[in-house]
Structure formats: C-alpha cells, structure tokens
Amino acid sequence: MTERKETIKAFLIRTLADPVLIYAVIAMMSIMTHYRRTEMWIYGIVAYVSGWAIFRLFDYINKHHFIGFFAYIVLLSGFIAGTAKAIEKGSENYPISWGLWFLTPVNAMQYNKWFTLSIFLLFLIFMLSVIYYFTRVRYRLFMNFLILIIPFSVYGKENEEMEIGFIIALCVGFFIILANFRQMSDTKEAKTVDRPEMFRSAAVFTVLFALISAFVPKPPVEADRTMIETVINADALTDKFLEMLDVFRDDSDGEQFRRNMGNAPMYYATSPQPLQLKTATFTSYSFETDKWSYSEADSEYWYRDEKPFPIYYNGGVAEAVMLAAENDGEFAEKYGLTQFINADIRPVDKLNLKITSVRRGGNSAPVPAGAVSFDSCSFENTLGLTKSGIVFALDDEFRENESFEFTFVRPNFFLIGDNRSLANHIAAIEDYDEFLSDAILALPASDDTSEYYEILEENIDFYEFAKENYLDYGDSELIYNLSQELTAGLDSPYEKARALEMYFIENDYTYDLTYRKEMGENAEDFLFDTKRGVCYEYATAMTLLARAAGIPARYCEGFNMQTTYGDISSQDYIITANDAHGFPELYIKGYGWMCFEPTRTTMEIVKEREDVSSLLVKSGLIILGISAAVLILIFLMPVLTHKIFLVIVRRKSPNAAVVSVMRRIRKVYGISVSSSAHETEAAVYKKSSADISAVVMLFEKGEYGGYKLTEEEKTKAISTYIAAYEAYNEAVKAERKAKKERNKRMTV
C-alpha cells in the first residue's frame, strides 16, 4: 500500500493552524506586551511568520539529525549575531548598559527599540526551540509547565499583572498541547479514551476555565502600606515619594508619572472641592534631554517666621483695581474703567483647605492651586516662601502627621458676572506696571484696603519679571506656528490659554501610561508626531505653547486631589502616590497665576473607565451566554445528536438507513469502525446486553447480499438502534452507580 502524498493546500492548512506554533506566538506576544504594548501585534505577526519558517527547519532537523545539528547551529548563530547587533545599536547614546537596562523595571527607563528587539530575538529562538522540542521531539509535561510559567515570570519580576486575556490563552494553549501530545496506555488504574471524548473534556475545561478567569477575579485589596513603608525607610518607592516632595530637586523628566507608584497614602485633606496641589516648579526646559530644571526664578525665596502670611499673584488684581476706580474718577477715566463701575464685578469665594501628611520626609508643603495665604502649620521652625509660591521647611523636613492650613480662591473668576470683560480690558493695557502703580495711589486709605495695597505692590514689576523668566520656548518654529494658529483672533491671555488647553482635548491626544518614549523624543514629538504621553507631556507642551503665545508660564509638579472617602458628599480626601501630577501655571494679566489642565480631567478618565467597565460587562455577558450555550451543547450533545440522527436516518432509503444505523451504533458504543458487524454485535452485548442481531442481519443482507431492503425492515433497524441507545445509557448509569458504591466502601 503506497503512502498518499500530502497536497500543498493540506500542508499549509496543517502547518499554519499548528497549535504548537500558535501557542508559541501567544507566549511571545504576552512577553513583548510587557516590553512594548503598542507594538504587541507587530511582534506577534513577526513571531508567527518567522516561527512557521523555523518550525519547518525543525521538521527537517528532526528527520536528519546529523545535518540538522549544524543547521541549528547556523540558525542559533544568526539569532545571536542579530541580538548582538541590536544591543550595539541600542547602546549608542543610551546612558546605561543592556544588562542594567534588562534588570531595571521597564517603566523606570526610556523606551529603547533596539534593546527591546534584542529581547524579542532572544526569547523568540529560545521559546520556539524548547516548545517544539518538548512537544514534537520528546514530550515532557513538566518541561512544558516550566515553559508556561516563563511569561508569568517576566511580569512577576516587576510585580506587574499579566492581562487576563493572555492568562486564559496561555493556559488553554497549554492544555491543548497536553491533550494533543500526551501519550497514555491502558492500565488497571487508567484507561486511554478515544479522541472525541478527549476533546469534549478539553472543551468543557476550556470554557469553565475562561469563565472562572473572566468573572471571578481576585478581590480588590486596598492595602495601607503606611506602617511598612514608614518602618522600611530604604524602600525604593518611599525614596521616590520623598523625591517628589523636594522643592529644590535639580530637574524632572516626568518618569514618576509613567509608573504605578502604589496606593500608599501621602496626605489626608479636608476641602470643599478637589484641587491641584503644587510641591515644585520648574522654569527651564531642554529639548535635548526633554527635562525641566529649576532656575533662580524657582529658588528665590523669603523667610517666613510668623504665620499666617500671604501668597501673592493668585487673583485679587481686578478687585483691587475696581476699588481704586470707584474711589478715584480720574484714575477710572484714564484707563477706561468707568464702564465697569456699575457692572456685575464679583470677587470669588475664599475657601479653606486643611491637609495632613502621612509620612515623614520631604521639605515642600502641598500648596493648593489659587492659594492666597498660608494660615497655620504644626511645624514650628522657620518656613520659606519661594517667588513661585512654594512653601517649604528651611534646613529641615516635615514630619508625619504634619498639618497645613491654606486659604485659596476658586478658579471660577472668569466665569461669573462681568469679571472676564474687566480682566480682558486690564490685560490690554500696555504699561501694566504704571497702571498698577496708579491703582495703588487711587485706593482709599483704610485698614480694610491694606490687603489690596499688598496685592498691587507685589504685582508691580512682577509682570516684567515674568516676561524675562517665563517666556522661553526654545525658539521652536513648530511650536510658535502652532501657538499662533491656535490663538489667532483672540486678544486676551485668558482666552488664549483656554484655547491652548482645549486643543489637547479636542485633537486626539492620548493619555497612555504604557507609552515609553524613545531616546531624543521631546515636546515637539509629542505635539506633532506621537500624540501619546502622560501629564508631563501635556503640561510641558501647553507651557511652551503659552510662552510662544506671549503668556508667561511655568511647569509645576505635585498632586491631583481627587479621591474622597466616606459618603458621596464628603469633603474628606485621600491623596496617594498615584495622584502625582504635572500641570502648567500661567500668569494672566488682570488676575495673576492660574493653573490649567490640558491633560484629560479626572472625571473624563473616570468616565472612560466606566465606559470600559460597561463594555467589559456587556462583553462578559456575551461571553457568558456563548460559554453557557457551549456547555449546554457539550452536555446535551449525545441527546441532540441522537435526535438529529433519527430525523436524518428516517429520510434515507432502507439500505442507506441500515448502514447509517450500524455506523451510529459503533460511534455510540465507541467501537472501532474497522470492527466487523458480528464483532460489533458482541461488543454491544458485552457492554449493555442489548441485542442488535436484527441490524446485523439486515446490514449483511443489504450491504453484502445486494438485496433491496423494505421500509418495514428500515423501521425495524431504527427500533433496534433506539433500544441499543437506551440500553447504553442505562449501562453507563449502572457503571457510575457501581463506582460510587465501591468508593463508598473503600472510605468506610
């Protein structure tokens, strides 16, 4: 008997749908997602195509061991050479070695495409080699299990969770490989099952595993690490937290915003509204390093021995000017303020914030956006107040349970009454310093107006100082042109600032914690190319755009106070390390410093999470429905196939029906198709004591004797099949009952 040659089509179908290859590709995708999520599918496609070709080489090696050995050495040498070349390319202008990069958490380093490619090449040849060998050459269950946990180990070394989809796919793939390649033989303790039964079991396991994995996640744990991280002062995360609270750190590249910093509490606060908290400011930006660094504008400060003390430049200018205009008609007429004397000019509310630190360390107090005064503090030593509005401990650090109290103004000045028109009018006055000096002279002299004197005096010359220090955007032509385009036709600084802020929200910029910048990427790349990043990129880009539009701006870092605890109306907030945030602060003529939020707001992120959760729930219900249907089909399949068989066989001719009945009986009883009719009869009787001699006689009469059977004989054959089917079910039930009885006797 000659062996039938496999067609090209059959060969491609068999090799392209190879479960071993697909399992290897899933393993590679899960690993590379850890290193570069955005390119997961690219790596998957490359792994699939190259894996298919390499598996064909492995097939050859498996048949030609001597020549194959040298072929594998050549293949391995090629991968090693490619890896070495990738490492060499990645080391160019990169600050650390490949070894240190590999040992460092990926979200602590800038993305290096060549180093990542080297990891891909190393894992690819390794995973393809071991998965092929321990399935097709020498099956080893334990080795396959070790291979399974390799992707989990990659995530585990950095305490990162693998996505549930990959977990399900890897475990299901492992079980499919086990079912395909596991060699079993009959013993007293175990019996080899036929392939259909094996795959039914595999299907049940797969569906149940997917359901349990998808719908029974581990319970959320809100762990308070305060005690642990207070005791273990050397903890790397604690060090990073404290660095974030250092007002005079040299620079910032925003890396702390690209990682999961944990839910360790930093502060507890009581406030009538969520706020941005400022702990550091940076003035100078470098396009070469994509870093902010502090300058004299950030480090210049005054001693503050007594509390409370004011924090200037945050609102109040318009109110002071209108008080002067109402008191001095000449001043009002000189600067065109008469029209606003009877207008609806309203001051914004002044509110109070109390905030308490959880941990010891750091020398910077969390100053709320719009702060106008520092009211009190449990810290008894001398404080400093920088020109950029940061309050810090001089030659000391704040302790745990340190309390701070501030007065701040709501950021809604431009949204009420005629305030915006007045501020825009003031902003259009050319000689701003002279205007503020005249306003001081026009103010009524009384104790009630002393606060307004101080506001105007502090703002005199400050605008010139702001223009000297906060307008540098690196002379980037791209940033300048975009800034001019976005602010064209807008006259006031506030309107320009809002236009810049909305640009990011309305133009498909993506907040992406998983995005890793390549070496050399900077604000220009974010604005015009990648459009992906975290708050650092958004805040940096808006700061530079504002400067290019002529609005003094600085980059700030601190926290987003956004999470309440208690009931829905609670004014109690918890600020964790994961609330670390970067944002721009702009100097608006006619008002003062104002914080903006180009990054998607907290509510938008929460809304997106809700949408995703809703989608997951819907998807989960769909999966649940499909899975339930699959389980029902699996368990009802014998009954369904029996009913369907009866419908189909009754429509056949008598001769064809008898042949179908014989095949069906063999399938139900698990009898080999090569068995003769009498062998089938004996096997059926042994299993269930059913008599199918009538079917055997009709089968031989029609199939071998050439007789044309009648409808009555077809009906008799079908009736015999039904009796044999019912007898089989009764026999199976009896076996199960007997097995339970034996087990019960053994346990007694």
Image (cartoon, rainbow, N blue to C red):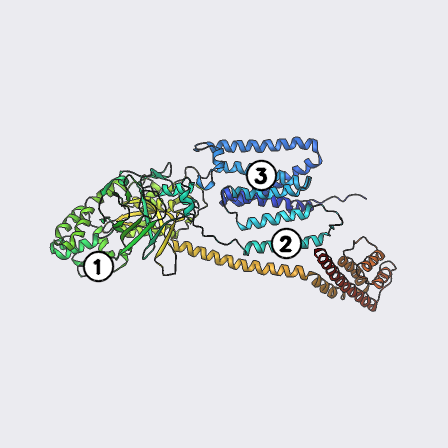
Position of the N terminus by quadrant: top right
Residue where numbered disc 2 is placed: 205
Is residue 191 shown left or right of residue 375?
right
- State which tag comes first along the sequence, 2 or 1: 2
Amino acid residing under circle 2: Phe
Position of the C terminus by quadrant: bottom right
Q: Nearer the viewer, mark 2 or mark 1?
A: 2
- State which tag comes first along the sequence, 2 or 3: 3
Q: Nearer the viewer, mark 2 or mark 3?
A: 2
Q: Nearer the viewer, residue 437 or 732?
A: 732
Q: Position of residue 659 (x, y in %)?
A: 80, 60
SS of the residue under disc 1: loop
Residue where numbered disc 3 is placed: 124
Is residue 553 shown left or right of residue 336?
right
Measure the C-alpha gap from mark 2 to mark 1. Answer: 71 Å
Residue where numbered disc 1 is placed: 345
SS of the residue under disc 3: helix
Measure the C-alpha gap from mark 1 to mark 3. Answer: 68 Å
- State which tag comes first along the sequence, 1 or 3: 3
Measure the C-alpha gap from mark 2 to mark 3. Answer: 29 Å
Q: Position of residue 727 (x, y in %)?
A: 78, 63
Q: Quadrant of residue 253?
A: top left
**Mark 3 neighbour class, 10 Å CA radius: few under 14, some 14 to 19, many 20 or more:** many
Q: Say if mark 2 contacts mark 3, CB within 8 Å.
A: no
Is residue 689 shown left or right of residue 615?
right
Amino acid residing under circle 3: Leu
Is residue 402 shown left or right of residue 615?
left
Q: Residue at x 60, y 48 (%)?
A: 171
